[in-house]
Amino acid sequence: MEKVAVAAIVTVAFFFTLSFSGVESGSNLTGDSSIGRGPAVKGLCPDLIQRFDYPCSEHKVISLSLSLSPSADKGWLRIGPSSRLIRSRDVERTKGSSRSASTWTLYGSMNQSLGYILADHGFDVWVGSVRGTRWSHGHVSLSDKDKEFWDWSWEELALYDLAAMLHYVNSVSNTEVFIVGHSQGTIISLAAFTEPDIVKMVAGAALLCPITYLEHVSAPLVLRLVSMHLDQVVLALGIHQLNFKSDILAEILDSVCEGHVDCKDLLTSITGPNCCLNMSQVDFFLEYEPHPSSSKNLNHLFQMIRKGTFARYDYGRSKNIRRYGQFEPPSFDLSRIPKSLPMWMGYGANDDLADLTDFQHTLRELESQPELLYLENYGHVDFLMGVTANRDVYDDMIEFFRSLLGKSNSS
């Protein structure tokens, strides 16, 4: 099999952006806290890869954003084909997000982590940590204590960060790229694909639990937080960083759940039921996840739920006029995604975040007809952590990629 560059773009899974943290003492209003931040960070290589006896190296690249100076580091894992070489790539970028490269390489079983599975099938796998994660807090001029460091939402991840990832992988491997995304990773991917300069670097995309519209989200805890306007409260308090490992998170969730939402199974209250999780793996997963995110990102996602739109960030009518030249933020037009772009999508009936009605809305707006994998018993997290996802989901995804090898310049 010919080597193919596969960029598994690891971005925020939606349900982890729902947590938030409190204000530290003094003038630091980022929401950062040293309490309960998870394992001490040494780096992607020593923390995740070398313990599995894989060779690993780290690199940095600078990218730019229209709104910020050269920016924060993106963590990269490169999982080579047959040699099983893994490299960590810390790509400099604008700022941070919430799910990291660890998501795709976290589990002790190599036959259950998608990054290793793709590598074992001969793909050259690049996994990018998104801004703000513990692997990605660098910046050429800002500190993660600065408000400006966290002034972003998934829109910047789509239009600037994903573009930078694709440019970098394309320049190093001299090939088009296959993209894999889950949950908010699909929001970012689909928004980016509406931009001709970005989508031209993509040979195909596999999207798990695809999301663009969130009007029919039914997860009880999510709806409770939206109805409380929690996102707006956090911003009004001057909290810019959402630190999911802080002690205050447990207190806030307790107060939100008490008398309103059954949060005994917190994962189910946020994502809906999942059929196929190994709880020991979930516990291991939670040692590293979730990573920090931004309050603005939470606000953007809640805007989508309230308004039923797939659009850029809403700054309010007066600022929208100055920024966009119109009262409402522009929508991302899915019909702009080229019909020629091959796409594969996996979705389930028990997903309270990527709702079937919203998914059908997405399909109606696309010019193309993606290949679809529907699993009636699967929920939102099963596609990422299900004990049978390797055969239920990943085999079909890999067959899709292989079918493109002879049709793509990347073969």
Image (tube, rainbow, N blue to C red):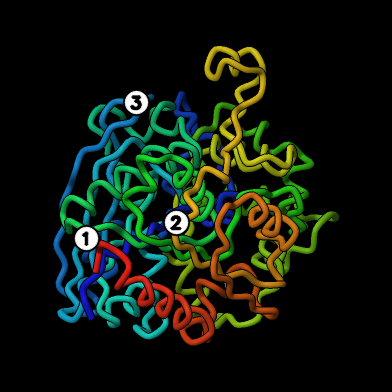
Q: Where is residue 339 in the image (x, y as percent from the top left)?
A: 50, 54
Tell me which residue sits at (38%, 49%) in the image.
130
Sequence-wise first label, 3 or 2:
3
Left or right: 397 in relation to 74: right
The kind of secondary structure element at disc 1 is strand
In space, the residues marked 3 and 1 are separated at their CA atoms by 25 Å
Residue linked to disc 3? 68
Residue linked to disc 1? 88
Question: In the figure, 147 relative to 277: above or below?
Answer: above
Question: In the figure, 97 relative to 177: above or below?
Answer: above
Task: Evaluate if marks 1 and 2 touch, with contact meaning CB atoms under 8 Å apart.
Answer: no
Q: As rendered, which of 4 and 297 lies closer to the eye?
A: 4
In space, the residues marked 3 and 2 are separated at their CA atoms by 33 Å
Sequence-wise first label, 3 or 1:
3
Q: As rendered, which of 50 and 332 lies closer to the eye?
A: 332
What kind of residue is marked 1? Ser
What kind of residue is marked 3? Leu
Task: Evaluate if marks 3 and 2 touch, with contact meaning CB atoms under 8 Å apart.
Answer: no
Q: As rendered, which of 185 and 398 lies closer to the eye?
A: 398
Left or right: 268 in relation to 407: right
In the figure, residue 127 lies in which quadrant? bottom left
Q: Position of residue 95 (x, y in %)?
A: 36, 38
Residue linked to disc 2? 340
Tell me which residue sits at (39%, 31%) in the image.
149
The kind of secondary structure element at disc 3 is loop
